[in-house]
Image (tube, rainbow, N blue to C red):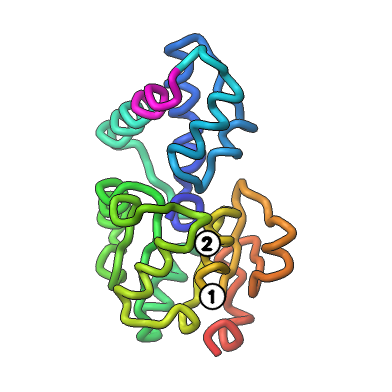
Amino acid sequence: MDGLLFDTEIIYFACYKKAAAHWGLDFTYELFTACIGISREEAAKFIRQHFGDKVDPFELHSRTYEVVEEYLQSGGPIPFRPGAQEAIEFFYKRGLKIGLASSNMRRWAEFYLRQKGILEYFSAVTTCEEVKNLKPNPEVYLKTAQKLGAVPEQCLAFDDSAPGVTAAIAANMRACMVPQISKPTPLIRERAFKIYQSLEDIYPDIDELLG
């Protein structure tokens, strides 16, 4: 969802910077990229390495969530990523079941999908509250496939983050990366089905993707 369907990663980065400034700290872009697509617990390790004992990582997370809530309540825009809305509508009109496998919270996921008018296209939504292990563990993808009534090998997965694509590969799905901030790892370059610059670029390969 974040970074693939919606241009929310840059919003989260700004919110982390604003939250860290409360303690007089600079939340750098490099630190933010290290935290993309992983659990709060895993991200906390990078935050501790970066800031030491200057801030409790979970207090920083909590303050950041408050800043994000303020942004959403103020009516801050949630832009689509290029080609995202069109891709969702395309797959839906092809009669395919669409599932969302997100490390984000259900409350935010459903808010974004509803606000942008695409919630009705999703047959399943799986979020961090429903799994014990977040990406790169495949659990969120496997649970979504189960909800869709599909075996993982029948699923085509798109993700923007390296942990997310790694999770889809581990789930034995046909995994495609559409990187925004996160870069493909050697594993992803070797085992991903396709790597695209944008969801706008998938259509020349659509028969192969769905084959």
Would residue 64 be counted in the magenta stretch?
no
Tell me, yes or no, if residue 187 can be seen here.
Answer: yes
Write down the quadrant of residue 175 in the picture.
bottom right
Report the label total: 2
Q: Which residue is mark 2?
A: 167
Q: Quadrant of the N terminus?
A: bottom left
Nearer to us in this view, 26 or 131: 131
The image position of residue 123, as x and y in percent, is 28, 73
Q: Is residue 133 above or below residue 198?
A: above
Name the element at disc 1: loop
Nearer to us in this view, 194 or 203: 194
Within 10 Å of disc 2 (Cα), the crowding (few <14, some 14-19, many 20+) is many
Mark with earlier residue (1, 2): 2
The image position of residue 178, as x and y in percent, is 59, 61
**Disc marking residue 172:** 1
Q: Is residue 35 above or below residue 86?
A: above
Main SS, magenta region, reads helix
- Who's the residue at 67% across and 63% down the image? 188
The image position of residue 129, as x and y in percent, is 29, 50
Give left or right: position of 35 versus 62.
right
Start-end of magenta stretch: 56-63
